[in-house]
Every structure is written in C-alpha cells, then in structure tokens.
Amino acid sequence: MRVRIAASVTVLGLLWAGMPTASAAESPTYNQDVGSILLENCASCHRPNQVAPMSLLSYKDARPWARAIKSKVASREMPPWFADPSYGTFSNDISLTDDEIATVLAWVDAGSPEGDGPAPEAPRFSDAGWSHPSGTEPDYVIEFPIAWEVPADGETPNFNLYTPLPFNDVLRVSATQVRPGNYAATHHITTGLVNMPPGKVLGTGPAWSGGPMVDYVPVDDPDADPAAQAIPAGRPQGGRRALDPEAREEAAAQRAGFGPYIPGVGADVARAGQVREIRGDLFDYVIWNLHYQATGKLEQARPSIGAWIATEQSSQRVRSLGLREATSEGRQLVAAPPLTAEERALAGPSQVGQGLNPTLDPIPPNDGNWTVTGVGAFQNDAVIQSLFVHAHVRGNDFTWLLTYPDGREEVLLRVPNYNFDWQFEYELAEPLRVPAGSTVKSIARYDNSRNNRRNPAPQKEVYWSEQSWDDMYLTNVSYINADDTSEN
Ligand code: HEC
C-alpha cells in the first residue's frame, strides 16, 4: 500500500503549495517507495560476494537494471520462491505482495525516478558476507584449508574430504552457515561429523576413485598396530548396527554437523529457545561432501563454516523426520533403511549414492508423470517447524499432506514448479502441533519427458543417486517433541 500513501502525501504537499496536481507526482520513486522493497527482499542475495550477479543496495546499483527488474518481478521469477500461496504461511517467504509488485512496475514505467528525501537505509549485513539476519559475523569460523580447483568443463563427481574438528567439547550454537567460497561453481555442500575408522589416518589419496590426489582423505595408517585399532570407548564408529529408531535418530542428530550449503539458503538460525549442539566430545573430524559444477572457466572454491554461539541456557532439541519412500507408482516398497551419512562416508567415495532406497524403481524413459510417495509417522505429540524437499532436474512438483489420527487431512505445502536451482527449507510461520500417530506424506512427481526443458536425456531410464544426471527423492520434516522441555 506504499504507493497510495506516498502519492496522497505528495498531493497534499502540492495542494498546500497552491499548485495543480501533476500526474507524475503519482509515480513511485526509489527513495520513497521502491528502495525499501529492494533492500528488504532482494539485497540479501543482491549484494557483493553473494549468489546473485549484481548488487541492488542503492539507487545507483538498481537504476541500470530497471528493465530487467521489471521483467523478473512481473513474472515472479524474482525473488525466487516456489510455494503455492494457497497453502500454508512460511516465515521465510520472500515473495513480493501484489502491491509491492505494482509499485516496482509503476516505478520502472515512470522512468525509475530517484525521488526526493533521504535514501532508504540498507539493513545491516555482515561485512564478510555471512547471511545471519542480524547482520552479525559468526563467533567461530572453520575455513577449508585449500581452494579446490574446478576444471572449466566436464563433470566432477560428488566427493568427500575430511578436516580435523578444531574443538573437543560441545559447541552450543544458535546458528550455523556453510559458505561455498564460489557460488557459480558450487552445486551443493553438505557437512557432517565423523571419526576415522580404525587403521585409517588423514593423508594424501585420490579424492574419488580415479580422481586427483589430494590431502584430507582417509588412507591406511602405515604405523597402525592392531592394539591401536581398538575403538575408543564411547566413540561412535561406522558400520551398520542394529540401532532402534530412537537411537538411530539420536545418532543422526549428533552427526548432523554444521548443515549444508544449498542454493538460496543462508544461515540456519534456530528458533528462540532452541539450541543445536556440535559434538566435539564425540567426533574428531568434519566431513565435507562437495559437489562442484563446471562454469566454462577454471574456478577456485574454498568453502568455510560459520557458527554463532548460543546465549540461551535452556534448549529444545530440533529433530528430523525423513519421509521414507513408501510407494513408487503405486507399488508398495519394502526396503532396508538408507545408509546414514557416516556409513556412506565410510563406504568409500565410489559407493556414494548407493545409500538411496535400492527398491525404488528407476523412472522409465519419456515418462512425464512418475510419482514417488514418502511417508513418516510421529511417535509422540510433535510440533512441526519446517519442511524440506530435494529432487534433481526431473523433479516437477511436490504436495505435502498431513493426516491426523482421526483421518482429517490438510495440505501443508504445495510446490507446483519445483526448481533444482533453489532448494528452500519451508519454515512454517506458525509451528503446527500434531498428535502422536499423525502421518506426513510427501508426493513428488517427476517429468522425464521432452517437455521438461531441463531434462538432459528423456530417452534414458533414470536411476536414483546423488549425481545430478540421476535423480533423488529427499524430503524431511524438522520438528520438536511437544513435551520436550528439556533443560541442559
Ligand atoms: C535468494 C536469492 C535472491 C533473491 C532474494 C533475489 N534474487 Fe535476483 N537473482 C538471484 C540470482 C542467483 C540470480 C542469477 C540467476 C538467475 O537469474 O536465476 C538473480 C537474477 C536476477 C535478475 C536478472 C539479472 C540478469 O543478469 O539479467 C534480476 C533483474 C533480479 N535478480 C532481480 C531481483 C529483484 C528485483 C529481487 C527482489 C525483489 C531479487 N532479484 C531477489 C538471486 C536472488
């Protein structure tokens, strides 16, 4: 509604001056109307050293881009946001309102005037380029020791490197962020916490089977004597163990590390009263799962991790419910649970991606409407906080359904045009309390036809793996147990 208010103030001003109203006075200006819209909704990405190609921090920055801004804002391509507004309200929804869009378009049509008055003030941003909404710098930074060279072309497979975790105690954090160091060349990064398997040390070896030699990979310890290979007491080790679901979830939470870098996602900030623990007492190494993409020129990428130390005393633990693939085109699936991140790390680089559900049928060639449904059930009363979806370029749309124990159903989220370039965690504006026995279902549809412009090979059968020419079904609910009032 900023247009009308601004316009009527101007009109009043003109009447007081005893002058006739001019229609130009109705146009929005940068200083009065548009600057604040761009600063609040665009500058988080459109500032130096961020993911977007140009800065939109000032009139001088924005003016040359006016035409492009009009076109991207009118088509709702910018800011990127993919939830269907008919379902749910999300606190990290960065889309513009209809009024804001009308204001931006009217400003461009009027010749993008700067207008009178002081320029709107930019929100505080981290000087070093971090994305905590407060604009503060992290208290703790771990830089990857080397810059990885990404060749100008060709595919680099996913690979894992390891660095020592530089602390031995529990780091209680309110926020973490993984920055890629090079946005264009980075497809994604995930981090986790691990220990070296017995008989291995960090050394120089192939980054992946047949890949370049590099430091920071586990190699056989030449000095290992059998006694030294005993597992230290209380330290989680690799290998598939018969864990009950609660223990498995606990272990997964401990290993979660500092989180991922995913396009579109900045710092992962805990809700008020919630704290995450980074367990330096249990783990000695950070595992970096790195996935790079060629940009046409030789690129260097040196990722880093930032952590903001928690000041809150009490903590509620945020849990994660992975929706396991339950059906594939109506066929009921029964499968061993996928490997955990740690198990995958220990399985060796050549096996990365093998942890995906082995009974999931491949997507047939030229199939434009392949469906996979995942289901998860809450064992306790729970409070749902956010939803995450991940697929690759065949991913077309997602529908999330909540079913209460009495059979009532509610759509939690619709992503009608899933876009591999932007993988948002959808944060519920109002966390949703659900009783034990509620289930959440996420139905994904994949388009392996020629109609999918991003499809590199519609004639091919598509397998499930972490490589982006294959596909994935990964859906997650972040929640807390409703009765979890634990104090640490
Ligand atoms: C979450 C990050 C993000 C936000 C928020 C965002 N952008 Fe972008 N924007 C990008 C990225 C990345 C690109 C380049 C890739 C692309 O076009 O998708 C881009 C591209 C653009 C382009 C095209 C530039 C060109 O080279 O032609 C325009 C114009 C633009 N954005 C305007 C905006 C405006 C206006 C807003 C706010 C109303 C906004 N963006 C919000 C990330 C963002």
Image (spheres, rainbow, N blue to C red):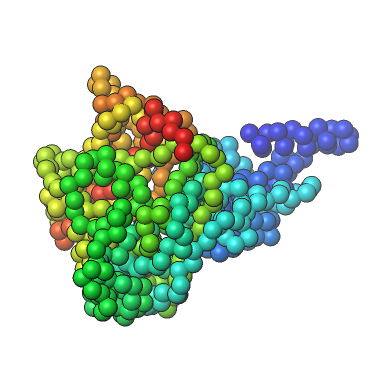
Question: What residue do we see at 17% from left, 47% from top?
Answer: 242
Q: Quadrant of the N terminus?
A: top right
Residue 219 is drawn in which quadrant? bottom left
Judge from the rendering whether residue 216 lies leftward or rightward of residue 323; answer left or right: right
Question: What residue do we see at 57% from left, 56% from top?
Answer: 139
| Extreme residue toward the top, this view | 406
Whether residue 77 is visible, yes or no, is no
| Extreme residue toward the front, this view | 227
Determine whether 360 is above or below 442 in the image.
below
Question: What residue do we see at 44% from left, 30% from top?
Answer: 485
Question: What residue do we see at 36% from left, 44% from top?
Answer: 388
Which sits in the foreground, 450 or 156? 156
Determine whether 221 is above or below 140 in the image.
below
Which sits in the foreground, 419 or 223? 223
Which sits in the foreground, 430 or 350? 350
Residue 161 is drawn in which quadrant? bottom left
Residue 427, percent from left and from top: 44, 39
Judge from the rendering whether residue 394 lies leftward or rightward of residue 87; answer left or right: left
Judge from the rendering whether residue 311 lies leftward or rightward of residue 327; answer left or right: right
Residue 241, percent from left and from top: 19, 51
Whether residue 311 is visible, yes or no, is yes
Residue 184 is drawn in which quadrant? bottom left
Judge from the rendering whether residue 207 lies leftward or rightward of residue 79; answer left or right: left
Residue 437, percent from left and from top: 26, 26
Residue 13, percent from left and from top: 83, 35
